[in-house]
């Protein structure tokens, strides 16, 4: 339906932009949602029984965190297919929604494990998470560009978080900085892979639409 | 290297062979294998019965006080002890239950006195408890050393800071309201308001602050103005971190000594340990729900890919069952081997499902489905399995490896998860191999049956015979309502084209899903509640019943003063409530005891003047009346969780306080007396709670109404009425890029090879069929009759062919004639490419316009104009848009143009057949309504004339309309002549030349023929059959008969065709459409009107006006549905019985070229090459299909849900309900076919389409039936 509307519009450029915007919006909301839910998981580590204001604990992490997560995920999700196209190696591995859902589930599971499972020490925790993240990449992505993008984004995000923490903008309930620093990149990496997967799948739709149209013409 | 490769190859071979054998086994013995699998599932799940059902209710365990010692950390194998009872509890809770009353009651006292001085006593008691010191040999202990020291309150609870203790002993009592300070209490003018102040607004189910501080439920405290019993009850709750028997017993004896409870018989030798399970809060629920949503999305997207099977739902269900039961099996097996699950099953479950996954199942299905269809089921299954064996094994090995790595992380939780996952994977593999494969084989077999049923020769008319040796008992051939149905996938999984909300609504309505889910959910929930009794429903219900019982408290709940003479019962067993209450009866009752029993029922003024303080068994465990979240919430305020831990409740210390009236008056606040006397005794706290309830209800109602309004607004905003936009243009699937899915499989190409009927030299213009026979007439005037089943050419009613072999006189020999006709076709000098085949469709169209027979004399010396004649009045070529609007049928200019176009290639190139056989009007005289006598003469004449120059048949005028009934072909010619031909023998049976104007349309119904003429008149003919032998003349409904050559009008019959009535001015302008059905004849004309005639008496019933352009399409069927479409692009639906217009929609830009109705929708096509599907009842456009240019008009409905449309050299099948393209069939091998211009659906579901000079017979493709 969207494609048809695009077809009647003046040109492919406009169509492409609207598609991009729609994709970005969807990715943004997915990112916000995941940020909220995962934040809740982290909050639970400390609170187990009914705090009287559960709802406020959902938003306990500062208003700017979910939007920035959403923005980041939109960026990643748009960037992945772009880079695929730029590199000229379209991603062919397991392009289907069920695989994407599986990927998201594993991502939430990694978060769940990091929040719920009691590890003996932080080294073990971060090692496990790193292995899980790499496994996620191997299972659902297997592309070099995806790996590179994931690593760079994870590093970038970790540095950003550290800067924020040092400046006191953002604080963790647990003051152990080493602890946080060690597992954060893994989570970021897994998140980047997940969002990239979603973004690619969304882009696939658009691609199919366009292909169909050109076929028709 | 090579060695390794061979090893690998060998392994692969072996695995493949094993899978092949396994597949054969599964497909051969489906029932035993399914039974075996079910049995093994049940066996493996059996240990699960021993696991407790999940519930959040606390569990109790009672021990004695005397020999109590803190349980050791190691869980003991003791069966009586629950496994949670090890290690010290979180806290010991000592409650001091205070009952205080002012006695004797004085009439001078005001209601406030009931609770002010009793509450005031709490401060001295607190003082006593705090300062109590116990010293024995082991040292001096005070409360400070034993009690649970708490720190800050939970950050979110700032407002409770003034009430709850911080940084010290956790000791709660009503005194906390006044910060445990007596002077604050004394200066408080309104105690009730202070208490009420901290109550949360709205309805609360969990423990409120009042409950926490008073330690008894609000209504038992007696702190209100309307306390009839005038007894105030509260507790002082001391939370201890260590158990010290000496200190506790000394405290107990001290308090008892200070405030003796004379009649108290509470047991004090039991302590109760309460274990709390993990509670699932909203905070935990949100991630859980999220994971489940993701899980369902995963399952949805996975099962969506199951395709090309008979029952998609069934297989999806089987897949889910496979995964679920493999999980259950793994849990069961783990329990069996002593690995008790400590993980929260609900939390890890989604991840387990995701890890195990549905992939294998889907891969199996795809693989099996993509095997050749014509193989035996067994072999298909085996082959499919062995094809995928390697990848399945590889995946399995990979997953096991990953899990093994996870196992070596040495984190207990992950290890446990991995263990489960391994067992789950193995059991899943087992189930896939046995259960799912077998189900798949059954499914495939059912599909085969349906397939075989359909493929049986339809013309034989036999019942579907046995579908082969593969027939199994459990898969009987399903009922087949229509002989032709196509695979319809389950609606939920399809890419529907209906509006989304409609789909949801349809789905809900169809399945009644919501109701069922709610019902099932409620039943399960109630079952779980009753089973686990988490919220203490039974006690709650008991309390409710006892409260509502008219005699007050027969069970002894509450504070019924039934023990006024309690000393009598001191020796009684107080543990059993039953033993207490019957007890008073046999004993001699003092007067006030019976009075006490009746007291609650006695009106207010007659209350006893001495309030009775009684102690019953219910006071022994007063905490039971509290919410089961009482203790967790108290501890959670200090960020201490009780989940998976336990607390120990020590026996309560009863304290009875009697206060004198003087004391009560002394403690009065000056404002207390000003309190108005109770005007409405009922308006109490009860009423207040009632009010809040009502408020909540009203709020809920308002919110509901608001929600509905909001949704309505959303609906209006988001879904404007014209949501039926032009749909997505479906790209035609080219051959060679059949849709491959992600696994690289493509659906098996069903072998639809369209039957090509070749023979016509020119483009085919008229098509008619009665199901058995098919008659076609080409531009050259040649009529060919085909067998609709086999595609054999039965007859040629020749024109040129006959002429060409005129010298040989081959007319007698039918076979000779046939072969000659066939052979002639090839060497026909009129090169078909000379017509307009060489040009593209679009260029060609204007030339093929209808031409008016205005220049009969020119026919002899002018190029043959027959190729220009388009008698297909129902389908107008799209180039009409470009032509300027014209009034009526003025084709003069067109013909001129044609002439000009045809002149250059030199007229000599056209050895015009009509010029060779210039027609002396001899035939016209001959063919005056043949009578009984001269039929044979006519017959002979025809034969002779066939051999000669001219026959009775009018050869130079072209056939404009043709109909086929029985085996009579009615042909209307441009000269106005109506001819009846024998379809089998190819002989002219009779003809009628009453009319002069060309016949533009024909309808042949029963024994009547209706002919519409160019001048707007309508002629009704009756076909009379004179049977010399009295045989039946009509074989009944077409399709039931056997083979076409069985004549219905035997050649001996004498057939006459008489004009019964002629309506001269049926329409002002030429009639464009003529349709007849259900005893009605409907005509549409250029004069914008539609007329309905009765067939029997040719009486005009209605003139339907409503179009603003000429009528171009009409549909009427047996159910009296009448639809008409006009040049204005409008479609009208009419009620044939009343002549009223039912609905009127504008659907197309340009003419409506074709209209078909089904029971639920109307399908229209227009010059804009758009096919629109409308809802018949509402007139809403459901969706539309973009057609290729020039093919817009060719469409037909095969069944209720199957639409067929023509395209460039192909026909496409669509699912009408959803607008899905089901299949595209290419008609010619080369692939560069012309556009399909006409499409005729036959009764046996074959489709005849005319493209170019060829006809194509397509049987509805390999249809797999789906009845869901």
Image (tube, rainbow, N blue to C red):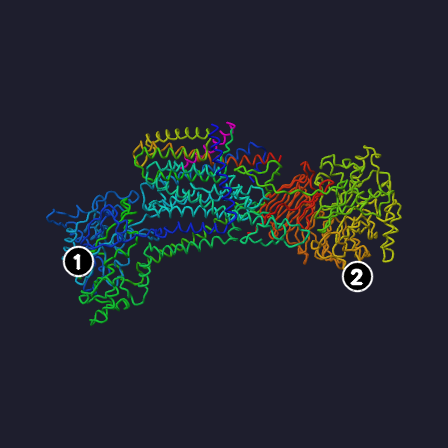
Task: Using the rendered image of the protein, determine whether residue B1058 is visible from the camera's viewpoint.
Answer: no
Which residue matches tag 2? B1030
A79 is within the stretch colored magenta: yes
On the rendered structure, is A99 left or right of B117? right
Specify whether B411 is left or right of B670: right
Lower sequence index among marks 2 and 1: 1
Q: Secondary structure at mark 1?
A: helix
Mark 2 to mark 1: distance in Å? 127 Å
Mark 2 or 1: in front is 2
- Labelled pair 2, 1 in contact (Cβ < 8 Å): no
Give how far across and how far down residue B302 sits, in percent: 49, 42
> Which of B642/B106 is in front?
B642
The reply to whether residue B1253 is visible in this rendering is: yes
Task: Count all numbered tags in the image, as a single digit.
Answer: 2
The one nearer the camera, B1038 or B338, is B338
> Magenta stretch?
A66-88
Label 2 element class? loop
Magenta stretch contains residue B109: no
Which residue is labeled 1 in the image? Answer: B666
Which chain is disc 1 placed on? B
How many residues crowd around disc 1 within 10 Å: few (fewer than 14), some, or many (20 or more)? few
Label 2 Cα crowd, 10 Å radius (few <14 / some 14-19 / many 20+): few
Q: Is residue B479 left or right of residue B337?
A: right
Q: Main secondary structure of the magenta part?
A: helix
Q: Quadrant of residue B893?
A: top right
Question: At which x and y percent is residue A160?
Answer: 37, 30
Q: Where is residue B788 drawn, in percent x and y?
A: 71, 48
């Amino acid at each position: 339906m969207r494609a048809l509307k695009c077809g009647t519009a003046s040109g492919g450029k406009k169509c492409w932009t609207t598609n991009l915007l729609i994709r970005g919006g969807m990715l943004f909301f997915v990112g916000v949602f995941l940020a909220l839910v995962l934040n809740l998981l982290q909050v639970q580590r400390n609170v187990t029984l009914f705090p009287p204001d559960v709802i406020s604990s959902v938003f306990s992490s500062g208003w700017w965190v979910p939007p920035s997560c959403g923005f980041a995920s939109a960026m990643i999700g748009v960037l992945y297919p772009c880079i695929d196209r730029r590199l000229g190696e379209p991603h062919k591995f397991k392009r289907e929604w069920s695989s994407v859902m599986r990927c998201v589930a594993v991502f939430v599971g990694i978060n769940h494990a990091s929040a719920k499972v009691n590890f003996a020490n932080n080294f073990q925790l971060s090692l496990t998470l790193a292995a899980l993240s790499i496994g996620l990449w191997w299972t659902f992505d297997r592309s070099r560009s995806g790996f590179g993008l994931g690593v760079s984004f994870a590093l970038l995000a970790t540095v950003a978080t550290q800067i924020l923490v040092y400046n006191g903008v953002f604080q963790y309930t647990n003051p152990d900085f080493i602890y946080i620093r060690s597992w954060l990149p893994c989570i970021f990496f897994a998140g980047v892979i997940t969002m990239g997967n979603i973004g690619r799948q969304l882009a696939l739709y658009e691609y199919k639409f366009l292909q169909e149209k050109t076929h028709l013409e | 290297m090579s060695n390794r490769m061979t090893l690998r190859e060998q392994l692969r071979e072996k695995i493949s062979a094993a899978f092949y054998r396994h597949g054969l086994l599964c497909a051969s013995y489906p029932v035993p294998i399914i039974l075996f699998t079910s049995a093994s599932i049940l066996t493996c799940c059996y240990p699960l019965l021993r696991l407790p059902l999940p519930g959040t209710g606390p569990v109790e365990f009672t021990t004695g006080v005397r020999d109590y010692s803190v349980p050791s950390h190691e869980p003991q194998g003791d069966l009586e002890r629950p496994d949670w009872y090890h290690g010290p509890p979180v806290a010991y809770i000592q409650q001091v239950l205070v009952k205080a009353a002012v006695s004797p009651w004085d009439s001078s006292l005001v209601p406030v006195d009931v609770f002010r001085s009793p509450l005031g006593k709490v401060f001295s008691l607190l003082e006593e408890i705090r300062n109590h010191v116990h010293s024995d040999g082991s040292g001096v202990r005070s409360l400070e050393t034993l009690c649970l020291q708490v720190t800050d309150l939970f950050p979110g609870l700032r407002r409770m800071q003034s009430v709850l203790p911080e940084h010290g002993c956790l000791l709660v009592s009503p005194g906390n309201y006044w910060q445990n300070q007596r002077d604050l209490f004394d200066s408080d003018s309104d105690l009730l308001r202070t208490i009420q102040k901290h109550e949360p607004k709205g309805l609360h189910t969990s423990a409120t602050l009042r409950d926490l501080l008073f330690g008894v439920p609000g209504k038992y405290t007696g702190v209100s103005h309307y306390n009839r019993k005038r007894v105030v009850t509260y507790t002082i709750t001391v939370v201890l971190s260590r158990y010290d028997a000496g200190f506790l017993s000394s405290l107990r004896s001290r308090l008892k000594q200070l405030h003796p409870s004379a009649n108290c018989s509470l047991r004090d030798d039991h302590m109760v340990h309460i274990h709390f399970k993990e509670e699932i809060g909203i905070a935990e629920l949100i991630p859980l729900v999220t994971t489940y949503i993701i899980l369902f999305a995963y399952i949805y997207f996975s099962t969506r890919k199951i395709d090309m099977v008979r029952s998609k739902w069934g297989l999806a269900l089987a897949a889910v069952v496979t995964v679920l039961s493999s999980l259950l099996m793994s849990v069961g097996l783990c329990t069996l081997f002593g690995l008790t699950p400590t993980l929260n099953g609900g939390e890890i479950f989604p991840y387990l499902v995701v890890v195990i996954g549905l992939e294998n199942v889907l891969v199996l299905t795809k693989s099996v489905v993509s095997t050749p269809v014509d193989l035996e089921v067994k072999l298909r299954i085996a082959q499919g399995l062995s094809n995928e064996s390697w990848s399945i094994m590889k995946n399995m090995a990979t997953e096991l490896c990953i899990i093994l790595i996870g196992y070596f992380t040495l984190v207990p939780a992950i290890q446990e998860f991995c263990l489960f996952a391994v067992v789950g994977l193995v059991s899943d593999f087992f189930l896939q191999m046995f259960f799912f494969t077998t189900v798949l084989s059954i499914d495939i077999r059912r599909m085969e049956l349906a397939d075989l049923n359909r493929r049986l020769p339809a013309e034989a008319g036999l019942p579907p015979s046995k579908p082969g040796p593969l027939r199994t008992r459990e898969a009987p051939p399903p009922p087949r309502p229509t002989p032709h149905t196509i695979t319809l996938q389950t609606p939920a999984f399809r890419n529907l084209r209906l509006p989304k909300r409609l789909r949801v609504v349809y789905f809900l309505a169809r399945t009644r899903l919501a109701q069922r889910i709610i019902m099932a959910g409620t039943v399960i929930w109630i079952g779980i509640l009753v089973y686990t009794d988490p919220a203490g429903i039974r006690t709650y219900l008991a309390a409710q019943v006892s409260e509502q019982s008219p005699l007050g408290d027969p069970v002894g709940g509450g504070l019924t003063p039934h023990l006024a003479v309690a000393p009598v019962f001191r020796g009684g067993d107080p543990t059993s409530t039953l033993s207490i209450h019957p007890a008073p009866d046999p004993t001699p009752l003092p007067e006030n005891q019976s009075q006490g029993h009746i007291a609650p029922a006695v009106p207010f003024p007659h209350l006893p003047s001495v309030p009775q303080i009684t102690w019953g068994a219910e006071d022994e465990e007063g905490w039971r009346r509290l919410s089961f979240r009482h203790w967790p919430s108290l501890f959670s305020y200090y960020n201490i969780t009780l989940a998976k831990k336990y607390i120990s409740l020590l026996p309560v210390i009863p304290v009875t306080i009697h206060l004198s009236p003087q004391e009560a008056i002394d403690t009065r606040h000056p404002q207390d007396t000003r309190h108005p006397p109770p005007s409405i005794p009922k308006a109490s706290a009860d009423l207040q709670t009632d009010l809040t309830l009502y408020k909540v209800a009203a709020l809920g109602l308002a919110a509901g109404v608001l929600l509905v309004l909001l949704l309505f607004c959303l609906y209006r905003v988001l879904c404007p009425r014209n949501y039926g936009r032009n749909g997505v243009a479906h790209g035609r699937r080219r051959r060679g890029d059949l849709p491959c899915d992600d696994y690289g499989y493509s659906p098996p190409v069903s072998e639809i090879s369209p039957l090509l009927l070749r023979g016509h030299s020119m483009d085919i213009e008229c098509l008619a069929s009665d199901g058995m026979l098919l008659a076609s007439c080409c531009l050259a005037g040649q009529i060919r009759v085909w067998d609709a089943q086999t595609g054999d050419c039965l007859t040629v009613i020749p024109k040129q062919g006959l002429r060409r072999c005129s010298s040989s006189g081959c007319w007698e020999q039918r076979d000779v004639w046939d072969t000659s006709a066939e052979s002639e076709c090839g060497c026909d000098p009129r090169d078909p490419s000379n017509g307009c085949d060489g040009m593209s469709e679009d260029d060609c169209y204007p030339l093929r316009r209808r031409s008016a027979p205005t220049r009969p004399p020119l026919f002899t010396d002018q190029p043959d104009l027959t190729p220009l004649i388009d008698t297909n009045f129902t389908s107008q070529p799209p180039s009409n848009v470009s032509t300027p609007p014209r009034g009526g049928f003025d084709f003069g200019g067109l013909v001129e143009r044609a002439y000009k176009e045809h002149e250059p290639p030199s007229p000599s190139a056209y050895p015009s057949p009509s010029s060779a056989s210039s027609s002396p009007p001899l035939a016209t005289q001959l063919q005056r309504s043949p009578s009984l006598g001269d039929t044979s003469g006519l017959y002979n004449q025809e034969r002779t004339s066939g051999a000669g120059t001219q026959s009775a048949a009018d050869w130079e005028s072209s056939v404009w309309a043709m109909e086929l009934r029985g085996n009579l072909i009615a042909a209307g010619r441009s000269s106005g002549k109506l001819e009846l031909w024998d379809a089998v023998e190819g002989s002219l049976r009779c003809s009628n030349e009453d009319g002069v104007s060309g016949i533009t349309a024909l309808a042949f119904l029963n024994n009547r023929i209706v002919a519409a003429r160019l001048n707007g008149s309508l002629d009704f003919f009756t076909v009379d059959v004179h049977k010399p032998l009295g045989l039946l003349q009509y074989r009944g409904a077409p399709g039931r008969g056997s083979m076409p050559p069985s004549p219905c009008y035997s050649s001996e019959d004498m057939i006459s065709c008489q004009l019964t009535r002629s309506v001269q001015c049926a329409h002002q302008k030429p009639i464009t459409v003529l349709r007849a059905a259900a005893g009605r004849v409907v005509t549409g004309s250029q004069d914008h009107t539609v007329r309905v005639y009765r067939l029997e008496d040719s009486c005009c019933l209605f003139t339907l006006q409503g179009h603003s352009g000429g009528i171009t399409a009409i549909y009427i069927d047996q159910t009296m549905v009448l639809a008409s479409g006009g040049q204005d692009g409008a479609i009208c639906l009419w009620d044939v019985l009343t002549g009223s217009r039912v609905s009127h929609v504008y659907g197309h830009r340009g003419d409506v070229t074709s209209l078909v109705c089904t029971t639920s929708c109307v399908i229209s096509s227009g010059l804009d090459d758009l096919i629109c599907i409308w809802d018949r009842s509402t007139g809403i456009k459901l969706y539309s299909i973009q057609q290729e240019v020039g093919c817009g008009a060719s469409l037909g409905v095969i069944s209720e849900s199957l639409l067929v449309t023509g395209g460039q050299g192909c026909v496409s099948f669509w699912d009408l309900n959803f607008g899905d393209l089901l299949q595209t069939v290419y008609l010619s091998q080369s692939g560069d076919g012309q556009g399909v211009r006409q499409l005729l659906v036959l009764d046996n579901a074959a489709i005849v389409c005319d493209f170019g000079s060829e006809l194509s017979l397509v049987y509805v493709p390999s249809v797999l039936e789906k009845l869901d």
